[in-house]
Image (cartoon, rainbow, N blue to C red):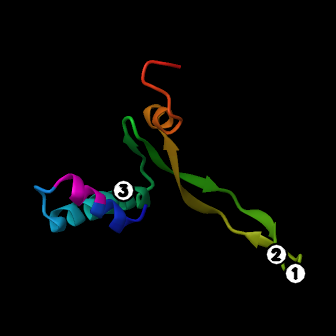
Amino acid sequence: MTRSELIEQLASKHPELTRRDIEMSVRLILDQISSTLEKKERIEIRGFGTFGILHRRPRNGRNPKTGIIVEVPAKDVPHFKAGKELRVRVNGFKPGIR
């Protein structure tokens, strides 16, 4: 789902809200998540999941076209781990049933 599809779906479910307010809300939430991750802080949304930063150490890689060994520098990458409630919903289990 794209950002515009999310906004469309929210607008259809909540006709009392203006499209502009929905766009601003989605943008503010995503901007806040991004800025928090830029500061290398963790975000936990209960029932949904956790956003964090993983540090990847430097390593040797290989150029698949030439086969030459290249150094891949260390870097930080964003990471999402789904919460238990989200995993249960995705797998189609009913709440309280294992």
Report if the CB atoms under discs 2 and 1 are less than 8 Å apart.
Answer: yes
Where's residue 40, x and y in %? 45, 55
Magenta residues span 9-14
Q: Quadrant of residue 59?
A: bottom right
Question: What amino acid is labelled 3 in the image?
Answer: Ile
Tell me the tag on residue 66. 1
In the drawing, does residue 41 fall left or right of residue 23? right
Question: What amino acid is labelled 1 in the image?
Answer: Thr
Q: Residue at x 82, y 75 (%)?
A: 63
Tell me the tag on residue 84. none
Q: Quadrant of residue 61?
A: bottom right
Q: Residue at x 42, y 50 (%)?
A: 41
Question: What amino acid is labelled 2 in the image?
Answer: Asn
Task: Identify residue for label 3.
Answer: 33
38 lies above or below 81: below
Q: Quadrant of residue 25?
A: bottom left
In the drawing, does residue 31 fall left or right of residue 90? left
**Element type where label 2 sits in the image:** loop
67 lies above or below 81: below
Where's residue 35, x and y in %? 36, 61
Mark sitting earlier along the chain (1/3)? 3
Report if the CB atoms under discs 1 and 3 are less than 8 Å apart.
Answer: no
Q: Residue at x 42, y 24 (%)?
A: 95
Q: How many other residues sit within 10 Å of disc 3, few (<14), some (14-19) or many (≥20)?
A: some
Task: Identify residue for label 2.
Answer: 63
Q: Residue at x 88, y 77 (%)?
A: 68
